[in-house]
Amino acid sequence: MLYCNMRKKRFARIFSLAILCLAATACTISYKFNAASIDYTKISTITINDFPNQAAMVYPPLSQLFTETMKDLYNRKTRLQQVQQNGDLELEGEITGYDLAPTAVNEDAWASRTRFTITIRVRYTNRKEDEKDFEQSFSAYREFDANRMLTDVQDELIKDISDEIADQIFNATVANW
């Protein structure tokens, strides 16, 4: 009889532990983090217009590359439908700066590093909440060795800078957390 009671207690402990484990794995908490804080019941569309290049120094593919970078970012990180005009949210602007400047000088007074900066002016319109509208410039830069020609590093640097500026704009427009 003592053996039977010990066996029942052991079975009860194992059974309780199994139920506890099953309950713990069934009740998991899941977080989805996409960086956007949009009320999709109010806002469902976005218009992203082309960003023409108005800078003094012009690199022809930059306008299309930056515009596509913006569209891709909003497609990946939101559920907003992109429309040609009159979206609930609207982004427009222009490329205002495409600049090179020496940043480091070596002992013979020649530049050893060059800073490449892109500046974009953005007008953001929120048709559902007018108080969130703004016009602002965003910029980012990368440095490269002055012994290299801009044409050798330009495409890679433009990609990195465009991604960074697009992230800045995204955070300023829909990542209000």
Image: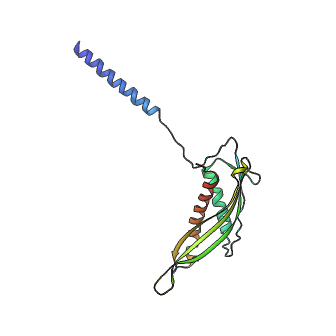
Name above or below for residue 82 compared with residue 51: above
Residue pictured at 61% horizontal, 46% vertical? 37
Name above or below for residue 126 compared with residue 59: above
Q: In the picture, which quadrant includes the N terminus? A: top left
Residue pictured at 29% horizontal, 19% vertical? 9
Name above or below for residue 91 compared with residue 18: below
Q: Farthest residue to the left: give it.
A: 2
The colour mode here is: rainbow
Q: Farthest residue to the right: give it.
A: 86
Q: State the count of labels.
A: 0
Residue 60: % across, % down: 68, 72
Residue 129: % across, % down: 71, 47
Front one among 68 and 173? 173
Residue 104: % across, % down: 50, 78
Specify the quadrant of the image occupied by residue 107.
Answer: bottom left
Residue pictured at 60% horizontal, 54% vertical? 171
Residue 84: % across, % down: 75, 54
Q: Farthest residue to the bottom: give it.
A: 108
Q: Farthest residue to the front: give it.
A: 131
Q: Is residue 53 left or right of residue 152?
A: right
